[in-house]
Image: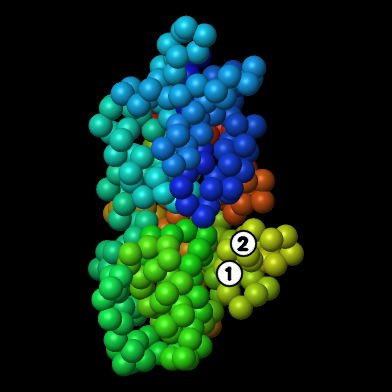
Amino acid sequence: MKKIALVTGGDSGEYEISLLTAENIMNQIDKTKYEAFLIHLKNNNWTYTHTDGQVVEVDRKDFSLTLNGQKITFDGVFVAIHGNPGENGRLEGYFDMIGMPYTGCGTLSSALTFNKYYCNVVVRAMGVPVAPSLHYFKGEPVDYQAVAEVCGYPCFVKPCESGSSVGVTKVHDETELAAAIEEAFRYDSQLMVEKMISGRELTCGVIRHDGKIRSLAVTEIVARREFYDYKSKYTSGLHDLITPADIPDELRNLISRFSENIYHELACKGVVRFDFIATPEGTPYFLEVNTIPGQTSQSIVPNQIRFAGMELSEVYSSLIEEALR
């Protein structure tokens, strides 16, 4: 039986969601094939808690454990950390250095897609519609005139490297811009100001199954607040998820094709989710990539997987085996 480290926790505002994701994966993982060890990462503490309550530090030289005098090494790692360090390439870089196989995107893909602005630049070059935006570093003056001309109002101010809409503000006019900039810089040293595209929020999961890139169903996200912010995402009753989305086949096919193309061109692996805003005219504008999408019981991708007629345990086994090849 293969030993798999299921890593969770992390150092971002998505910490609690990471724990829920790992809990669901642990419940669904095929226990006849894999012995899973839940490894918790928080700040500089990497630990495993045994069923008897014993807390064991991870040996970072080779990502191993010593439990009751016995050394435990892993065949691979299932990464279930949203945000830093699991989704931005840092943890993947460490695993690459020690030669440890892991699920999901590699170091470069993770780092690129986690930075919203840099990812937008690359995706735009692929011919996918992307909203106009401006990029600023902390300490750099924001050009208010450029914001008005390029993005207009309302617009969004976003930390470049933050998930679950943490630090994102919808700005209605210039008087709200300074506070939004300050909020974004609380979470990152870079921000982007992005033109607001009005339309329906749609998202499409993509997996590599049996060696082939395959898009899942398109889901529509209907937020009951002004936009799909952190509170909307994780508070029951503040959003509806409609799978499959009630949209024209032409739009569905376009979103699926864009998602599969981005997955391929950015060398993504595992299960990845791509978010879009579709205008009333039927043009889907790319928003962002989620290289480690939520796997809680209420998350989007598990519902898309079930709609495709697949079992979560089957998909998780496929992700592990892809990593171990």
Horizontal arrangement in the rendering, residue 228 relative to residue 278 (left or right): right
Horizontal arrangement in the rendering, residue 67 relative to residue 108 (left or right): right
Whether residue 108 is visible here, answered yes or no, is yes
Quadrant in which residue 140 is drawn: bottom left
Point out which mark residue 233 bears: 2
Horizontal arrangement in the rendering, residue 267 relative to residue 194 (left or right): left
Q: Which amino acid lies under the numbered mark 2 shown in the image of this protein?
A: Lys
Q: Who's the residue at 43% across and 91% down the image?
A: 174
Q: Is residue 203 above or below residue 129?
A: above
Quadrant in which residue 236 is drawn: bottom right
Point out which mark residue 228 bears: 1
Q: Which amino acid lies under the numbered mark 1 shown in the image of this protein?
A: Tyr
Q: Position of residue 194 (x, y in %)?
A: 39, 78
**Looking at this view, is 325 or 82 the one in front?**
82
Q: Who's the residue at 33% across and 89% down the image?
A: 144
Q: Is residue 1 above or below residue 130?
A: above
- The answer to the question of whether label 1 and label 2 lie on touching residues, with beta carbons closer than 8 A, is yes
Look at the image and tell me in which quarter the C terminus lies.
Answer: top left
Q: Position of residue 196 (x, y in %)?
A: 46, 81
Q: Who's the residue at 55% across and 23% down the image?
A: 55
**Looking at this view, is 32 or 108 the one in front?**
108
Q: Who's the residue at 46% across and 47% down the image?
A: 11
| Local secondary structure at mark 1 | loop
Q: Is residue 253 above or below residue 30?
A: below
Q: Earlier in the sequence, mark 1 or mark 2?
A: 1
